Amino acid sequence: MNTRVLDGTLPVADSAVVSIRRALEGQVPGWRAWLKFVGPALVVSVAYVDPGNVATNIQAGAGYGYSLLWVTLVASLIAMLFQALSAKLGIVTGRNLAELSREHFPMPLVLTMWVVSEIAAMATDLAEFLGGAIGLSLLFHLSLLVSMVVTAIATYAVLMLQKRGFRPLEILIGALVGVIGLCYLAELLIAHVQWPSVIEGLVVYQLPDAQAANLAVGMIGATVMPHALFLHSGLTQSRVPARNETERRKLLKYSHTEVGVTLTIAGLINVAMIVMAAGAFHHGHAGVAEIQTAYHTLQPVLGAASAGLFLLSLMASGLSSSVVGTMAGQLITQGFTRRQIPLWLRRAITMVPSFAVVAIGVNVTQALIDSQVVLSLALPFPMVALVWFTNRRDVMGNYRNGAGVRTLAIAAVAAVIGLNAILVAQTAGFNV
């Protein structure tokens, strides 16, 4: 570890590592020790509150009130399982999912996974980048193209924090997630919420009609994001490597707790999105399905404050998720190719489709929907690879999945792949 001293203080990355090492050695008491390990799952949780989720949740709440809330609960549980497996893979092996795939799979499969993952990274950034730009455009009355340029500059500026180590970027991402959460907490106080119906929607399985079934498939199928599965293993592999088995067990313990807490918060934000949309739109504006329409409808229904909070949360969501998407794309490329690429080049690659969509006049909402289909097609590759690696003793040693986790993971893979297959078939025009 580098212990270079600058102006009498350790560099940011080194001071964070020293602090975490002290926590591992038991020198930091109680909850303060746990806070030292908060970071990787917090960064990844952004994928579950991105603009794609916003658009889907608005449709669910506006069209079906509280009846599809149970879908967010199921999706959150699946997300917790797979993000925990991804984090464990990085901690135990010291390798990320892309690197292990290159090392263990035949080259034709590796090349296929790389190409599919790159396409998925672009599709992910399409939804995230456009979502943030839409929020900026509506709030400051800018053209969408100008808003995209501003969003691109802001994203690159945030990514520059990586030069100062992992902690500053984690703190900023955490702050943006906090902004999103506080905005929707305030929205719940403004909206007219029927809380008994919220509880019922969370625990009672309901599919009012065929369209609701289609929407539920889309909500679950687009929740477990390919780039998040790749990224989490990369964040835990390099953050603070375990020096012995005792440290590795502690790192796994803290990681599982962090995944549970942060993804529970992300799940609650998703619940709040649906509840807000149900309270604001379901009675009288059930046809609201686009982000722009939701904003313009919120102003007369709940007031300018509610509409402003909605745009603020959308910008925070778009900026943070675009940053995380670029980080994931960089890790995927380097893991599969074993080559370092400049950050500006990685960012440019993922932004090209977004600018192309706007330049040629494609409907932005339709582009967001199509990007989710692309993600559905890409999802089976990292999911299956992750379950395969974490179930292998020659890769994980004594940390391979137990029988219960193995059964749940395989069942979740089968369910999500099946749901994604249905989503793709329905998008292609088949009556499934």
Image (spheres, rainbow, N blue to C red):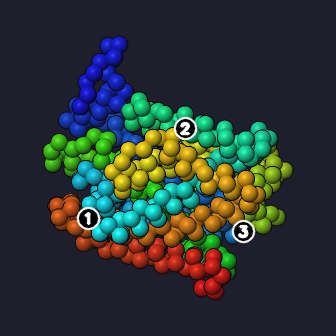
Q: Amino acid at mark 3?
A: Gly
Residue situated in front as seen by the camera: 400 or 298: 400
Quarter where residue 32 is shown: top left
Residue situated in front as seen by the camera: 199 or 315: 315
Residue with the most extreme top position:
7
Q: Which residue is mark 2?
A: 156
In this view of the protein, can residue 118 be seen by the observer? yes
Disc 3 to disc 1, how far (Cα)? Answer: 46 Å
Disc 2 to disc 3, how far (Cα)? Answer: 37 Å
Q: Which residue is mark 1?
A: 104
Quadrant, the N terminus? top left
Quarter where residue 341 is shown: top left
Q: In the rendering, at what x and y percent does residue 121 appear? A: 51, 56
Kindly identify which numbered label has been placed on residue 63. 3
Q: Earlier in the sequence, mark 3 or mark 1?
A: 3
Q: In the rendering, at what x and y percent does residue 287 appear? A: 78, 67
Measuring 53% from the left and 65% from the top, which residue is drawn there? 375
Side (left or right) of 366 relative to 88? right
Q: Secondary structure at mark 3?
A: helix
Measuring 55% from the left and 51% from the top, which residue is drawn there? 350
Disc 2 to disc 1, how far (Cα)? Answer: 34 Å
Question: For the residue carrying disc 2, how many other residues have a C-alpha within 10 Å: few (<14), some (14-19), or many (20+)?
Answer: some
Residue situated in front as seen by the camera: 57 or 318: 318
Question: For the residue carrying disc 1, how many other residues have a C-alpha within 10 Å: few (<14), some (14-19), or many (20+)?
Answer: few
Q: In the rendering, at what x and y percent does residue 317 appear? A: 59, 47
Q: Amino acid at mark 1?
A: His
